[in-house]
């Protein structure tokens, strides 16, 4: 979009993140120039040149990477999935590393942690990330603190402004999975974290049509190591998927605004519903994590978890009964999705078996509520 790189950088820095998602990573302006980057479909490049081969670099990856870099504040690498990005990071830990990690978190990450423990590659100290004293007590002697906040699907919020500097004082590396919050809600690198990971398959892409991941860091040596891992483990993204993710990112601001507004309204109504026992949503003033979230986050995300009063079977029945909300896993798309998390055997035992995770989309809130209310009432069997 801009005629020279430093002018572009200056303009981007002056923009609110809501505008930055729209303006970032545009091709240079010029007569008849396209407003979007192209899709680079080449497996090889003429010599001599910096890229050389399609597994080493790609202009469409670079466009998405520069966009995420502008939002998270660190050099970014895109991977073929969120779990590939997390695996790349775990793969560079020294053998015998001590990882302090949330006891609740994305179930795929929990599987990786268990595998690392079982193979002897790492020792894992599981903590309740919301219990700051417990996290701080586990840090001494740790190699890396792995934080997910809010956690998937328990929606616990870690006191990141306290925990991250404390970890850094002890020389503990800090990595944060920022998928649930997005950089519009919190920027962990600005709080001192070393690494931010995303499943771009969720809010950043926003349309449930790609699987992608990313890692961002301000540490250039770490960036280079991770780039080597991507090159030689081969977990590279497809050019079309990266292009779609950048296209989706353009509307992140308006999508998040609408989804969060819907989520607060739906969470409030769920607290009064006869089929619902406990609602977890940091945006609710009654939520145990609300005050902490309010103190440093710029929003509360758009995921709600709640326990079904009728147990696991009734929870499944509710999910299968909705007509507008899709009965499906995943989150962060424009469409609302829900599921009982324990339908997956990999879900953590600390998550209640009757917990439903609802990813609130951008539909009309009254349409959503009619559907959710009817499905929950139907599941009570009355
Ligand atoms: C918080 C979080 N991190 C990472 C992942 C893994 O991402 P992907 O499915 O893109 O591999 C997920 C997937 O659900 C997730 O919810």
Image: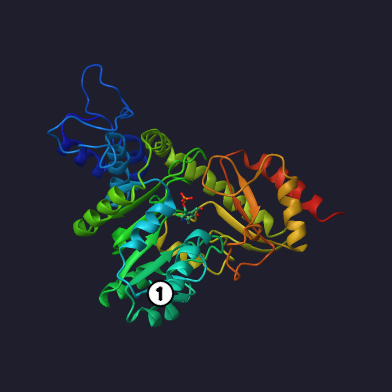
Residue at screen point 29% across, 33% down = 43
Residue 74 seen: no
Instruction: State yes or no: Cβ of the residue under disc 1 lies below 8 Å from any atom of ligand 1.
Output: no
- Quarter holding the C terminus is bottom right
| Secondary element at tag 1 | loop
Q: Residue at x 42, y 48 (%)?
A: 81
Q: Name the residue under label 1.
A: 120
- Percent x, y of residue 85: 37, 53
Looking at the image, which residue sits at the far right? Answer: 382
**Is residue 73 shown left or right of residue 365?**
left
Would you say 106 lies left or right of 228 here? right
Q: Dot 1, how many residues are within 10 Å of its Cα: few (below 14), some (14-19), or many (20+)?
A: few
Residue 224 falls in image quadrant:
bottom left
Q: Which residue lies furthest to the top in this view?
A: 32
The reply, left or right, for residue 173 in relation to residue 81 is left
Q: Give above or below for 100 relative to 254.
A: below
Where residue 271 sits in the image (x, y, percent)? 68, 60
Tell me what residue is drawn at x 47 percent, y 75 percent: 126
Residue 344: x and y, percent?
62, 58
């Amino acid at each position: 979009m801009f005629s020279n790189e430093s002018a572009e950088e200056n303009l981007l820095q002056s923009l609110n993140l809501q505008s930055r998602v729209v303006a970032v990573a545009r091709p240079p302006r010029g007569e008849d120039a396209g407003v979007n980057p192209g899709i680079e479909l080449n497996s090889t490049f003429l010599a001599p040149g910096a890229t050389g081969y399609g597994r080493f670099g790609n202009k469409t990856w670079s466009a998405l990477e520069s966009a995420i870099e502008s939002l998270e504040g660190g050099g970014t690498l895109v991977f073929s999935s969120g779990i590939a990005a997390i695996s790349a990071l775990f793969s560079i830990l020294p053998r015998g590393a001590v990882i302090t990690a949330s006891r609740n978190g994305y179930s795929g990450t929990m599987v990786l942690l268990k595998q690392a423990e079982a193979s002897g590659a790492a020792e894992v100290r599981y903590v309740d990330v919301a219990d700051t004293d417990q996290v701080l007590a586990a840090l001494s002697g740790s190699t890396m603190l792995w934080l997910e906040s809010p956690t998937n699907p328990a929606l616990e919020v870690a006191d990141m402004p306290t925990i991250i500097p404390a970890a850094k004082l002890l020389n503990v590396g800090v990595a944060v999975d920022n998928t649930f919050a997005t950089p519009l809600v919190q920027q962990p690198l600005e709080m001192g974290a070393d690494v931010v990971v995303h499943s771009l398959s969720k809010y950043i892409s926003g349309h449930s049509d790609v699987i992608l991941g990313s890692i961002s860091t301000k540490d250039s040596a770490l960036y280079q190591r991770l780039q080597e891992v991507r090159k030689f483990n081969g977990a590279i993204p497809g050019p079309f998927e990266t292009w779609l993710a950048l296209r989706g990112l353009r509307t992140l601001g308006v999508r998040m605004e609408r989804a969060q507004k819907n989520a607060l309204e739906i969470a409030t109504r769920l607290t009064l519903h006869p089929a619902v026992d406990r609602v977890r949503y940091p945006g609710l003033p009654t939520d145990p994590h609300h005050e902490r979230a309010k103190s440093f986050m710029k929003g509360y995300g758009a995921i709600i978890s709640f326990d079904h009063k009728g147990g696991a079977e009734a929870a499944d029945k509710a999910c299968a009964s909705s007509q507008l909300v899709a009965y499906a896993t995943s989150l962060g798309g424009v469409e609302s999705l829900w599921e009982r998390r324990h339908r997956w055997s990999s879900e953590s035992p600390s998550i209640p078996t009757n917990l439903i995770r609802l990813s609130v989309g951008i539909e009309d809130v009254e349409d959503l509520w009619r559907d959710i209310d009817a499905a929950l009432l139907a599941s009570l069997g009355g």
